[in-house]
Image: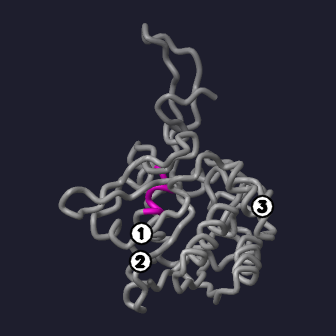
Amino acid sequence: MRVLAAMSGGVDSAVAAARAVEAGHDVVGVHLALSRMPGTLRTGSRGCCTIEDSRDAWRACDVLGIPYYVWDFSERFKEDVVQDFIDEYAAGRTPNPCMRCNERIKFAALLEKAIALGFDAVCTGHYAKVIKDADGNPELHRAADWAKDQSYVLGVLTHEQLKHSMFPLADTPSKAEVRAEAERRGLSVANKPDSHDICFIPDGDTAGWLAEKIEMTTGDIVDEAGSKVGEHPGANAFTVGQRR
């Protein structure tokens, strides 16, 4: 099969691509550029999708001996993920930008372009498994490593998208094994930390970032009896179940 490997610049996608190559597929690596403005994506050990990540993805493809491209999805990311994040908070809801990115960017937009270019499947480093039912329809299942399982963020994918999705890490028992394999394969990202938090908020200050995008209205904090115990800078800065 012709397989497009989505390369985030992390160890999971690098090993997933390596396994696709080893399985005999015709693999091409691609990194998604999600912002044209320097400093608008979080960098360092807790970031993703940055210039540094693009270079790491290129190095991995070089080791694997596969072609490497960078696709500019910045405008679609801004509209479908960043603006949606702002709109949801403004409406009093707490969004999940990573889930929306998987739905709208990493699968809908990426897969659409991949199919148009003649690819049969998109390979990613997600920890999830696709199993066909008795009628041959794809079903999304948990990965072998329940601690790293990401099937919940892929639950928004359609059957048609799942038909063209490949998750080579599905049966890997642990992240430690993925890192060990990367080390054996000579991939420089073997010990690269996992990405966390929201990539488009550079300093991690979600409340401060939202304050620049949404008009915040101050209000009272009351206890169950209705007695005022303090004031808040704006309800949009909080989410249900927040502990700190």
State the residue position of label 1: 165
Q: Which of marks 1 and 2 is in front?
A: 1
State the residue position of label 2: 111
Disc 1 to disc 2, how far (Cα)?
A: 9 Å
Q: Nearer the viewer, mark 3 or mark 2?
A: 3
Q: What is the magenta range?
A: 96-102
Position above or below: 28 against 89? below
In this image, 123 relative to 115: left or right? right
Label 1 element class: strand
Quadrant the C terminus occupies: top right
Name the residue rendered at 43%, 47% in the picture: 142
Q: Where is residue 165 in the image (x, y as percent from the top left)?
A: 41, 69
Residue 89 seen in the figure: no
Query: Mark 3 is on which residue type?
Result: Ala
**Circles 1, 2 touching at the beta carbon (< 8 Å):** yes
Which SS type dominates the magenta stretch?
A: helix
Q: Does the magenta stretch include residue 152?
A: no
Which numbered disc flags the more N-terminal residue, 1 or 2? 2
Q: Disc count in the image?
A: 3
Please tell me the numbered disc located at residue 190: 3
Query: Mark 1 is on which residue type?
Result: Ser
Disc 3 to disc 1, how far (Cα)?
A: 24 Å
Position above or below: 130 against 234? below
In this image, 226 relative to 34: left or right? left
Quadrant of the rendered image containing residue 237:
top right
